[in-house]
Image (spheres, grey):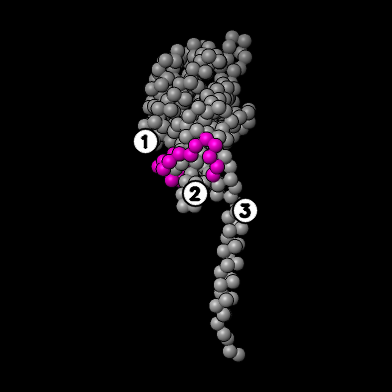
Amino acid sequence: MKFHRPAKAVLVAISMALTAIVMVVALTFSRTTTIETSGLNVRTGPGLDYATIGTVKKGQRVTILKTRNSWYKIRLSDRRFGWVASWLVHPKNNLKHVSNLSEATIVIDPGHGGSDSGAEYKNSTSKRYMEKTYTLQLANRVAQELRLRGAHVIMTRDSDRYVGLKPRPALAESMHADAFISFHFDSSPAHNEASGFTTYYYHKGASKKLAKALNKQLNNLPLTNRGIEFGDFLVIRDNTRPAVLCEMGYINSTKDFNQIKNASYQQKIARDITKGLNNYFKN
């Protein structure tokens, strides 16, 4: 049997059909939207690590092509493409201006939870006050402050439930977090033996830089600032994202616990952590 090459017309038809399919797929997975934030940065890739190549104005329409790490790849014109933080396209609050902090993805980790109560304080009536309660209270306040400034905040837990150690840094890895902050309250071997707060890092470089930036901002708290230290904690050790663990007082110290349970102390920490992160992302 003799085979013949397809006619030129057939090849052209096949080519046109494939082009049409590609266009249909592209249209299926793209949509247009209107930017609702003034001066939203456009970057070369999906994250703060990428260079800014311009901005889009409030009210400008763009085409969303795909999503990665909670960033949108957008088409500005026929030949111009870039990436924007998806949570800033339609912000949940009235954000006045975009900053590096508002473009950041931050994982907040309230230590312990559920069956893991952590350390505790016992008063004269032997009533137990568990660490897991106050780490969640503090984490919620920090998250609220950061969200007011436009940041993309993800909590490892937002209720009294158990979360293993390994899933916590894994969440930061999967979300390509720009910072991971784990909140805890310390405990000494004996009651009222120690006081103050410490900021721990494991990896040098970005994590140590983050620890310094946060700890520097905490000097006005009513407890002693014990500075930054190396800490071999799994949630920051098994974490390639910038990660710190903050022990914000000794829960088995009466002096410290009176602050730990106080909403005013927690709010001061939340504001100072937010300022520290803002400085960290500026530099």
Q: Secondary structure at mark 2?
A: loop
Residue shown at the point (55%, 49%) measured from the top left? 65
Of mark 3 and mark 1, the one earlier in the sequence is 3
Residue denoted by label 1: 204
Q: Secondary structure at mark 3?
A: helix
Give the image quarter of residue 278: top left
Q: Which mark is residue 28?
A: 3
Q: Is residue 150 visible?
A: yes
Q: Secondary structure at mark 1?
A: loop
Q: Which mark is residue 171?
A: none
Give percent across and percent down for residue 220: 42, 15
Give percent across and percent down for residue 249: 48, 19
Give percent across and percent down for residue 78: 49, 52
Q: Amino acid at mark 3?
A: Thr
Q: Is residue 88 visible?
A: no
Give the Cα separation between the discs numbered 1 and 2.
Answer: 42 Å
On whether residue 177 falls in the magenta region, the answer is no
Mark 2 near mark 3, Cβ–Cβ under 8 Å? no
Q: Amino acid at mark 1?
A: Lys
Residue shown at the point (57%, 39%) measured from the top left? 34
Give the Cα separation between the discs numbered 2 and 3.
Answer: 18 Å
Counting other residues with Cα less than 10 Å from the Cα at mark 3, is it few (<14), some (14-19), or many (20 or more)? few
Residue denoted by label 2: 77
